[in-house]
Amino acid sequence: MNLLFTKMLQARGSEYLTLDQQGLIISASAGAARFGDPPEQVVVGEDITRGFPELLGLEDVLIAICVGDLPDFSLTAIARVSANQVALYFDIYLFADPEIQRPVDQLICLLEDVTERRALEQSLVQNSNETNLLVNQLRISKNYIDQILASMADVLIVTNPLGQIKTVNQAAIDLFGYSEAELINQSIFLLVKDAQITMGKPSKCQTKNNKILVISFSCSTLETMPDIEPNLIYVGRNITELQRQQQRQELQYAIAEILTTTNALNQAIPKVLAAICTNLEWDFGALWMPEVTIDEQVEIKLIQTWGKENLTAQAHRAQSSTKSSEIEFSYSQRIVEEVWASGCPDWVIDIENDPRFFFKSFVDQSHLRSAFSVPIIGSAVNDDLIRETYELEVDDEFIYSKQVTLGVMIFFSYKIHPLDADQLKIMGAIGYQIGQYINRKQAELALHNQQEKTNKLLLNILPESIAIRLKEDETTIAETFDDVTVLFADLVGFTQLSAEISATELVELLNRVFSEFDRLAEFYKLEKIKTIGDCYMVVGGLPQRREDHALAIADIALDMLEVINRFNARNPHRSLSLRIGINTGTVIAGVIGLRKFIYDLWGDTVNTASRMEAHGLPDKIQVTEATYAQLYEHYHLSKRGTIAIKGKGEMVTYFLEAKKV
């Protein structure tokens, strides 16, 4: 930003920001932060929408200005209120540096303080009204008053002290739709629907055709003759459209805040429906979204409702007959399905005259008069959008594609609402905001599901503590455990059996047996290491150290034999035998490999446990002296004697028989 331009801005009380295409703040003038909400969010590197939420949803506008599709963009009359209740008004102007050839990668955001200008405008309006009243009081000239009345663009109504209308100008006649004769000698409250007219507070008024207007009145007295109470002159400005614009800006801000601060759709939607109904003066709102039926058909279903005065869908139906409720539901569904199919909004000024409403006799029972419906537009995720939204199984890939209708919002009112194209436009933008919110939540859900799948898969391969260390990018995992107990269990004669049965039967048999062993390992909180063919390896005392590791291994060994006994009882034509070997001592444990890695054990203790199994007897549990020393006080063991062990020489071994009672 050049120095001359900066000084010019300072002279006008303006500040600036420079942004990139993504809306990130690149630089800021010294006083730019005071326009932020909150000011501390207006810092370099921060998203512009954090300090200026009015720019939420305008990412496409920033890009359009950068590439030259849009010359500039502005937002005017933005209000802030400081902590000490001082009002600040400013305008935002977005444009690219005119000296740089498009496209550009930076934008200039000009922040112009218009507080004094707005105060001056308001002061000028007030002064103008007071001046007009003063002229009328001084001149007391009917002809001159008539000229003033005819030339005023604002509404002017003169009443006596009792509020009876004595004079109206043409602007009042045009605005309210009554003739002059219909208004003279009538109470001013024929037009004003509030209990009283309060200066400085907008009044709700009603035209002859029942249209509601918001008028801001100023009032003054008009002296006519001495000793006669003065008449009252009301000068009113129609601020209906201004208030409507302010309400809709507030609505968009409220919706953005709801979607930003709410974590789940089912929590956000009631707040969204409430904000729309309250701000736009509709009585009842509902959200419909597609669901997948049992027979794989996609149907639009009622998901959430909201009504004024805490009316729920059930309470609303309870006020009318069951038949009337069914008709209302059917009519709503008909509109929603059309909007869902077309992707276009719909507005029904008078439900009674809508050809889609076949049951005219029920209109009086439901009391509903107007309706409008808007689609929620977002991105489809291949063909699995509905499944993902409602937590059904989806493919692993999550790729956004075409724009589709994700749902439909419908609103009803107990009074007639004329077609409001501007309101439909605002609601279309809100529908798009909600669609983006749904897509974001779908992406988060897909990512969460994928992470859950990854975690479950990892925990099926590795102990939980080891898996956590791997996820923390620990490259080498190796640890020495001084006191653990290792068990090997082998199905005797399985090689011969594999030649007698089919591959499918073989795998099913192994799965049945080893699945029981897995459940036992989980029950005794032991760590299954691996299966090697028909051999099962489990260890106690790692990765979580425990003093009773030998006792837990002894318990699982006895239960393993019981599993085989039960299997043989159920399958007398195909009996199995199990040979188990156990040893206690020191091992090294760790993770090896880059792909298909495994948590494994090494050391003489492991080799000896394997030898105990290999040199054991069918349906016997052979243990070493080291294991015997930890078991003999709690279990019955018999001494086998001294046997020759390959690679170890002669060793004294024992058979584990049973647990002592």
Image (cartoon, rainbow, N blue to C red):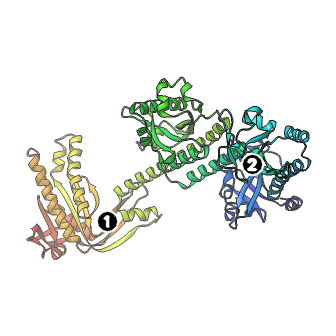
Up-down relation of residue 566 to residue 584 (above or below): above
Q: Is residue 217 left or right of residue 639?
A: right
Most extreme residue toward the front, as rendered?
227
> How many marks overall?
2
Residues 172 and 247: in front is 172
Q: CA distance from mark 2 to mark 1?
A: 102 Å
Whichever of callouts 2 and 1 sits on the residue coming sooner in the sequence is 2
Q: Secondary structure at mark 2?
A: loop
Name the one closer to the observer, 622 or 30.
30
Q: Residue 195 appears at what percent x and percent y? A: 64, 48
Q: Give the residue number, with chain letter if any, for mark 1.
A: 601
Q: Is residue 164 above or below residue 626?
A: above
User: 10 Å neighbourhood of mark 1: few (<14), some, or many (≥20)?
Assistant: many
Quadrant in which the N terminus appears = bottom right
CB contact under 8 Å: marks 2 and 1: no
* Quarter that holds the C terminus: bottom left
Residue 205: image quadrant is: top right
One can see residue 612 in this view: no
Residue at 50 percent across and 47 percent down: it is: 309
Q: Is residue 110 above or below residue 341?
A: below
Residue flagged by tag 1: what amino acid is it? Leu
> What residue is disc 2 on?
161
Q: Give the side of residue 589 with respect to residue 359, left or right.
A: left
In percent of width and height, residue 14 lies at 82, 59
Q: What amino acid is at disc 2?
A: Pro
Q: Residues within 10 Å of mark 2 (few under 14, many from 20)?
A: few
